[in-house]
């Protein structure tokens, strides 16, 4: 069995619950989390490292996955040069760029706080059948207003709420808080899934959570989302064209798109569980690219350790000049 080290700043349970039995195994790949000085076949860093970390693996099998879109985060070239492969929606100059969706972890079925508590795992979600839905539409949105996308999102939800009234329930920080996003998705026929930005290949948990809760999504986000999901499983909207988007939502509710496209939603849900899930994504990428050979000592540094990253870059340049 192949052994893959995963380094992340997030809680391990947030990831491992997306595997059968919570065992952090997918096919013939075993994933271990947030360890140092271990020997492994490949090393994956998700978004960042909490500190400088050492492992022993083939240097060609070191992969970085970005967790935020370009409107919220950038990655310095000296940080990315540590990695042989970079899975991202960012347009970066890197010899190992993989421009695809990043399989961001789901939020439904997990409670964040002082301790991360799992309410629903892969097995439970996979075994579910279509639930009874008594409410019309929901949205989960924070009151963040940092970027133009944040501000437009808040403004759009306000206008839509004026149109739909009690048919739209608004959840999230600054609105109606919830312990588990499942409560804000599963009882609803429709879900409004609004990304921070509409950037190619940036598909977050916002639409994945809608499918996991068997809700038909109206989606603002990646313009190429239909490259990954069945075309009729969601309706794309543009919140920067608010009246057109509101008309689309109201028309979709009236036409009962959740009923007309129920099978497409179920198909998309299956893709979220077994294809777009982080673990099958990693297994597929590593099968294509993983090199076999002697394992070497590899050090990786966080984004904010600029001196160490600069020294590493100089060392790499000197080795090339020999």
Image (cartoon, rainbow, N blue to C red):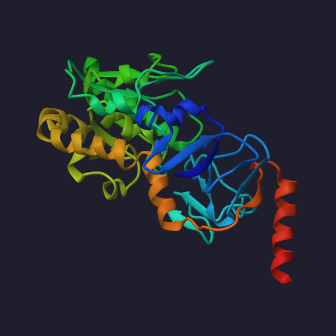
Left or right: residue 31 versus residue 136 is right
Q: Position of residue 24 (x, y in %)?
A: 51, 39
Can residue 46 be spotted in the picture? Answer: no
Can residue 270 be spotted in the picture? Answer: yes
Left or right: residue 20 versus residue 128 is right
* Image position of 1 with respect to 192: above or below: below
Left or right: residue 253 versus residue 274 is left
Q: Residue at x 28, y 30 (%)?
A: 127
- Quarter of the image holding residue 169? top left
Q: Position of residue 244 (x, y in %)?
A: 27, 44
Which is more toward the observer, 210 or 278? 278
Q: Residue at x 20, y 18 (%)?
A: 134
Q: Residue at x 73, y 40 (%)?
A: 50
Which is more toward the observer, 260 or 122? 122
Q: Position of residue 83 (x, y in %)?
A: 67, 61
Which is more toward the observer, 29 or 145? 29
Left or right: residue 272 versus residue 267 is right
Q: Residue at x 52, y 27 (%)?
A: 143
Task: Please identify the quadrant where the C terminus is shown.
Answer: bottom right
């Amino acid at each position: 069995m192949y052994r893959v080290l995963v380094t992340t700043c997030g809680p391990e349970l947030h990831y491992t619950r997306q595997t059968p039995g919570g065992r952090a195994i997918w096919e013939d790949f075993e994933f271990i989390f947030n360890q140092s000085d271990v020997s492994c076949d490949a090393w994956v860093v998700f978004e960042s490292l909490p500190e400088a970390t050492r492992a022993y693996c083939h240097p060609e099998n070191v992969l970085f996955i970005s967790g935020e879109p370009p409107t919220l985060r950038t990655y310095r070239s000296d940080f990315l040069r540590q990695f042989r492969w970079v899975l991202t929606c960012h347009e970066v100059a890197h010899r190992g760029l993989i421009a695809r969706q990043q399989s961001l972890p789901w939020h439904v079925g997990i409670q964040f706080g002082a301790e991360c508590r799992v309410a629903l795992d892969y097995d439970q979600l996979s075994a579910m059948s279509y639930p009874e839905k008594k409410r019309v539409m929901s949205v989960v949105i924070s009151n963040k207003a940092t970027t133009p996308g944040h501000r437009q999102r808040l403004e759009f939800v306000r206008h839509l709420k004026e149109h739909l009234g009690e048919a739209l329930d608004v959840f999230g920080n600054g609105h109606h808080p919830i312990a588990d996003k499942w409560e804000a998705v599963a009882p609803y026929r429709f879900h409004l899934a609004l990304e921070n930005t509409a950037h190619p290949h940036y598909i977050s948990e916002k639409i994945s959570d809608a499918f996991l809760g068997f809700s038909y999504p109206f989606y603002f986000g990646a313009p190429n989302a239909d490259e990954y999901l069945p075309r009729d499983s969601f309706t794309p909207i543009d919140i920067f064209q608010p009246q057109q988007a509101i008309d689309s939502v109201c028309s979709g509710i009236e036409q009962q798109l959740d009923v007309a496209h129920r099978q497409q939603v179920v198909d998309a849900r299956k893709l979220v569980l077994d294809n777009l899930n982080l673990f099958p994504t990693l297994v597929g990428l590593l099968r294509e690219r993983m090199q076999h050979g002697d394992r070497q000592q590899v050090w990786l540094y966080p984004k904010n350790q600029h001196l160490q990253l600069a020294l590493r870059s100089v060392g790499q340049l000197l080795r090339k000049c020999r």
